[in-house]
Image (cartoon, grey):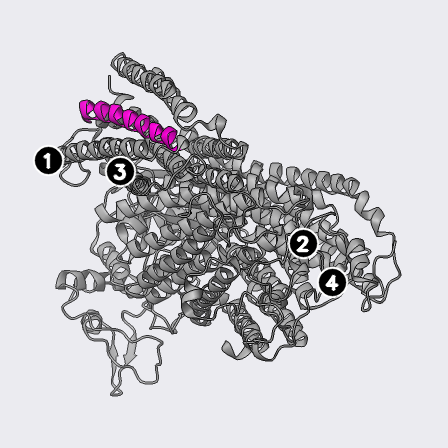
Amino acid sequence: MTWLPEASAHAMRIDLLLAGLVVISLAVLGLVFGLMLLNILRFRAGRTTAIARAIAAHKSWRFEIVWTAVTLAIFFALFLWATQLYVVGFRPPAGAIQVYVTGKQWMWKVQYPGGQREINALHVPAGRPVQLLLTSEDVIHDFSIPVLRIKHDVLPGRYQSLWFTADRTGSFRFYCTQFCGLAHSRMTGTLTILSAADYAGWLNSTPASGSLAATGEALFIRSGCSGCHASSRYAPDAADTSRAPSMVGLYGSRVVLADGRAVVADAAFLHDSIVDAPRRPGASFATEMPSFRGVLSEDELAALVAYLQTLSPTLPPSAGN
Amino acid sequence: MSGTLDPTAPQRSYLWQDGTLRSWLLTRDHKRIALLYLGSITAFFALGSVGAALVRLQLLEPGGTILSDATYNRMFTMHGVVMVWLFLVPSIPVTLGNFLVPLMLGARDLAFPRLNLLSWYLFVASGLLVVYGLFRGGLETGWTFYTPLSSEYTEGRVLPVVLGVFLNGFSSIATGVNFIVSIHQLRAPGMGWYRLPLMLWALYATSVIFVLATPVLGITLLLLAFEHLFRVGVFDPSLGGDPLLFQQLFWFYSHPAVYIMILPGMGVVSEIVSTFCHKPVFGYRFVAWSSVSIAAIGFVVWGHHMFVAGTSLYSAIVFSMFSFFVSVPSAIKVFNWLGTMHGGSIRLDAPMLYAMGFIGLFTVGGLTGLFLASLAADVHLTQTYFVVAHFHYIMVGGMVSAYFGGLHYWWPKITGRMYPETWGRLAAGLIFFGFNLTFLPQFILGFEGMPRRYATYPAQFQVLNVLSSAGAGILAVAYALPLVYFTWSLFRGARAPDNPWRATGLEWRTASPPPVENFAETPVVTTYAYDYAELDGRAGPPGTAVGGPHV
Amino acid sequence: MSDGSALDHHSPYETPLHRDETAIAGMWLFLASEALLFGGLFLICLIYSHTRAGGWAEGVRHTNLAIGAANTLILITSSAVYTMAVEAGKRGDNRRVVRAGFGAAALGLTFLALKGGEWGQEFRENLFPGPHFALHGPDAGGAQLFYSFYFLATFLHGMHMVVGIGLILWICRKARHRAFSAAWNTPVDIVGLYWSFVDLVWMLLFPLLYLIGRA
Amino acid sequence: MARIAACWGMLVLLLAAELVAARMGSGIGVGVLAVLMVLVIVLGFMQILRAPPLAIIFALGGLFWLTILLALGSLDSFTRTTVPVHAAALPGPTAE
């Protein structure tokens, strides 16, 4: 397990605050446990001679004043330190890239100023302030990005703002952290921080809106496929195929079936596999895929297949099934 | 239990005065009501623990193989609802408190004995209603019932659970009214406010919260029930309603409820530490007033549950500042317990071990509370496992340790039997170890960003989760131990003398177990609460402790 | 408590006076608790009547002022009549307790009957919030919030009325058996506190539901 | 008896004044009159001043906590700036 990375200057400042809190806590803990231990060692019944206890009882108020005052002073300093870092969140800089994020049971829809849309994924450039405008279509969600040390609840009926300037490229996870019902723990996604040039390239290569593949992506989430199948190259769990095979690069690859035949996973194979999942030799997955016969319409299957094809970008998409 | 019936006992104890079931179910005796409560909350504690066990088993694997998402969500909701309202909130007040308040006051009973019995029936009814809702259909909103999830988007059984908790509130209010009025009106002759045991100060402060915070929960749940029933209501965002208002009202009760849980524990620890150090509590008045100020300031900090919820900046700043203030009186208490130990004559019997466990674990819980009171740090840590670990340190590490310590400490008085000391110490040690193994890793998980209430989680968190689950296994064994040896002691335990710990306090001046009237004649108080010199003078020179207080 | 002024053997009290004072103090404490119960409702009203002022006021304008004002008058009178029962109880005059008690209870029932009529009218006019809500326009949402508040507040107050009337009838039954005396009349007093409190809550609900924002 | 009649008379007068104030559109006036009515009931009918001192403490305590609830509970709503989402805007603005 690696330590949680810091992907912004703000994250570093928060970690400094946390470190300060940890140091203070350890000091107090050391004091409390140390005194407890010392007292036990020195004052065990039968081990100690009588000490002037009455004095302690009558002079207590001096100690009380001292430790009350010291605690208050430390607390006040902490309060100021933490508050000043919090206020920053309420003051987004002018000129930030505004990205709309909508939470919905149980997925995140992301929309960029240029009309690009994504599901459960967020691409941002490093070095430029980004402001997320968050709202929900149903219950309260929460958009949490641990590597940036920020989160905010996402409420129906109003916009919440969350802003940051990332300074480290890479792919990280974001979560829904406000309990939102059945598939709450599946409502996660990938934050991809790109260099400015990569970001521009990504914007250009991403279709603006409404394509068949985009519909398929939404279906992939809504029908529960994403609960088991990995579908993102960048996601931290892209390698996790314990529950089901990954969809990344599946289209066009060779698949060995239970009877030993090897077939190329083309559009028809994808279509039939969704309707009735094939058995694979030697593979032991934690979950068994249900049949989707009659659950998904043909239009929906087409959209799903179109989406799966985009996960193998080096191959040209077929003309459907 | 009739095996321990002893007709030759010199005094007719409250336990065997009249052994019929009817006499128990219609009793107005605060001591019997305490035992009725003890039985009920033990059952609910077991039920809540089953929920916890299933949650921890599920989290052994990142993919969560043993429960479906839906079942997992129901289980943590069940764990939360049962533990909070059917165990933690009532625990010490209704068992030890019911038993001890009149005894410590030198009174025959509480001010309103019939109200006391009614409160037990309300409690049982509410418990059954909640359990019915949780098991016939289930509920998956978490114990916080946030709208609009709980009002308009859940298929769960909101109504029975919410109405159960609503009823439960009336049981709490009845207990609170009873305690406050009793402490005002029924003190024995000579017992001034500064002669009250600190346990009573703590219970008084707790009762203030019972009486003044619980009704707000009541109205909040009624509003929620209305909205769930008619699918439209005052929190409905589609009408321009504000779901955060539900949270404001909910936390107006539920944050002070944390102090309902911890204040009685602090009272118990004050009693135990003083007795087992054979020394007056250091800074009595500060400890006493810190209870009252915790209860008072505890009412104005609820907004710290909502720092990322979308409340205003001003509100966040005000609540953050108050949240820092509320930890000052808690710190005062911890330092005063340590001051009490200094120069005492310390005996490490099981109750003292539990009390020291409380001090240590509560300190960790309090310090991590500072992280969450600090605005910017809270933004990163809230709603993750850090919060889960933090409040378990307060409620389980702190409160449950104190509850077990109190049970051991007063067990001889309640039952007239001694528990086996070695087993008591073993269980105390095991609880401390198992608890830390369970919840320390969760602080790290929280910092790493693992959200709470997740049925599945990314594989990178597995190691710490396995550690935590292993600790939970140890904790389960440790909690089962007292159940076994307490039961054993009812039949085979040594007879308890009236004052086995050489403690001050009026409850130790009567028989173990006490007679129905509590005291043969009304005791008269002539000295302050922890006057060991007077006690040793009365009892003659102590035979067991060399370091007795000869000044 | 049924055996009048004597203390029963289990009672934790020194003297009857001690017991009676304790009971009255306990009732006040319970009323403080009740005040916080309604406090949650008042908070809702305080906030929405500002943040959703337009819709809220529109809701207020649609309430039936005539019935509301009549009910206020009835409740004032009922509370006054029951206070006479309390005075009679202090003198040990059981007959007057019965008479005043029945009077207060009858007025209370009248209040509930009028309230029920008002509710019926509102249901017919589709003022109960939901998909068929009668008011439309930009402020309809706020008006629905108001009516959610209105129905819950009047329901809760109505439940308190029902409990109060039940308690008064219980007092009347005891008084008919000549249970009270100049030495012992605490239950009459305590029920009086409760009844006046229910009255007091209405004195606050009435302006909030019918008056403020009406003009 | 005279006390009860006087209180009743005062309450009726206050109610009438309340109706007049409401007609004039004075919300504050209505509020003040309502508080006066509550005072008449607490002092006249419930006779708080003749209750045991403990009762007065409890009543003041309840009032104090009620104030906390109303003051701190409304703090957030009255200091918050809310950007509402209009139903039409939900699919997302296309041009920014």
Amino acid type shown at disc 1: Arg
Sequence-earlier tag: 3 or 1: 1
Taking the magenta stretch, the answer to whether it contains residue C64 is: yes
Circle 4 chain:
B
Numbered disc 3: what chain? Answer: C
Please give the range of residues in magenta. Answer: C63-89
Name the side, left or right, on which B60 lies relative to A181: right
What type is the residue that disc 3 sits on? Answer: Gly
Q: Secondary structure at mark 3?
A: helix
Kindly identify the residue that appears in the image at 48 percent across and 56 percent down: B90
In the rendered image, the vertical position of residue D54 relative to residue A215, given as above or below? above
Q: Main secondary structure of the magenta part?
A: helix
Please tell me whether residue B490 is drawn above or below residue C145 in the rendered image: below
Is B111 within the magenta?
no
| Residue at which label 1 appears | C124
**B421 up-or-down from A163: above or below:** below
**Residue D41, horizontal then vertical, whole percent:** 38, 25
To which residue does mark 3 refer? Answer: C158
Same chain letter for marks 1 and 4: no
Q: Secondary structure at mark 4?
A: loop
Secondary structure under tag 2 reads: helix
Q: Which residue is mark 2?
A: B270
- In space, the residues marked 4 and 3 are separated at their CA atoms by 56 Å
Q: Is residue A128 visible?
A: no
Given residues B321 and A8, the one toward you in this image is B321
Q: Classify mark 2: residues with Cα within 10 Å, few (<14), some (14-19) or many (20+).
A: many
Amino acid at the residue labelled 2: Ser
